[in-house]
Image: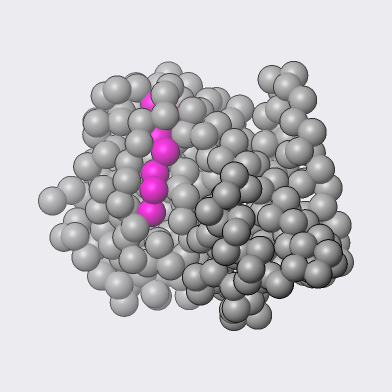
Amino acid sequence: MARIAFIGLGNMGGGMAANLARAGHDVRAFDLSPEALDRAKDAGCLPVASAAEAAEGAEAIVTMLPAGKHVEQVYATLFDAAPASAILIDCSTIDVATAKRVAAAAEAKGLVAVDAPVSGGIAAANAGTLTFMVGGSAEGFKRAEQILAKMGKAVIHAGGNGAGQAAKICNNMLLGATMIATCEAFALARKLGLDPQTFYDISSVSSGQSWSMTSYCPLPGVGPESPADRGYQGGFAAALMLKDLKLSQEAAQGANVATPMGTRATELYQAFADAGSGGLDFSAIIDTLD
Ligand code: NAD
């Protein structure tokens, strides 16, 4: 079993590190939060005092941090501590440009790095059923896959460095737009006198069908159980959807690509968050369209 450094033991990283320890790996865990370190200890990881200490002697270094600036800061402290044979696996959702920049900086130090953002929320992180989309070389993917497989149900090679982040933000831009479109359709259907369940029964087997409708229906009592049935608690917070939409818009600007639906979805989730609803599941936006 491998010695693995795990840095960033928050809502997602805590469960992921626990799954690596459960699989028998020797996990050296670091977070700025003492409470997160205590939880990691209870889950079978060895808490250490810094990211550099976690990296000493590690075969793999996994990071699960809030944003690109945190990854850049942590990587700067890791480079001198990590053995030359270590692989760096960043599972955070960050901007494509930073993902490429940190991978190039790692390579300049003789290290292999991949970006490996995830699909699936806190429940999937705890259950070890995440989907990983990996950007990096064929060698980097092969080495990362063995570690990531202990934390997820699918590990997919998206392309070179940054391609994992590109896949993640394009997927979530699509998700944000389809959720809003689904909410709009339910709101209009209701105003036109259609029973929501009847509309669901028709649209879920017709051409308007999407994951937002059939797996994550924004209306309570319609479709399979979803956050709508729990008062929009848990699930995927609107603030995190907004974060991913903003990353998509940053990437679209950099690539000089127009994404009008993504832009509008960003504006609507920004307004939703500004109104104080960022902590609710992202499907709760239906209440602003109804
Ligand atoms: P979180 O805020 O719960 O956890 C982040 C952790 O990083 C915190 O414990 C924080 O103390 C730690 N941290 C910050 N700076 C650090 C540093 N310099 N050194 C060590 N530790 C540091 O966030 P989360 O919900 O776990 O999300 C992590 C990443 O996963 C984000 O990029 C997020 O976009 C992505 N993501 C989250 C979800 C979700 O449902 N929560 C789903 C998919 C992807």
- The colour scheme used here is one colour
| Number of marks present in the image shown | 0
Compared to 1, does 200 lie above or below? below
In the displayed structure image, the side of residue 45 where residue 289 appears, left or right:
right
- Magenta-highlighted residues: 130-136
Q: Give the residue furthest to the left.
A: 1
| Residue 210 horizontal side relative to residue 251, left or right | left
Rendered location of residue 61, percent (x, y):
34, 44
In this view of the protein, which residue sits in the foreground, 82 or 164?
164
Q: Can residue 132 be found in the magenta stretch?
A: yes
Residue 9 drawn at (x, y percent): 44, 62
- Per the picture, the main secondary structure of the magenta-coloured stretch is strand
Residue at 67% across / 36% down in the picture? 248
x and y percent of residue 203 in the render? 61, 55
Residue 13 makes an appearance in the image = yes
* Residue displayed at 27% across by 39% down: 145
Would residue 201 be found to the left or right of residue 61 on screen? right
Q: Residue at x 64, y 68 (%)?
A: 198
Is residue 88 located in the magenta-colored stretch of the structure? no
> In this picture, is 240 found above or below 222?
above
Q: Quadrant of the C terminus?
A: bottom right
Residue at point 37% right, 67% down? 126
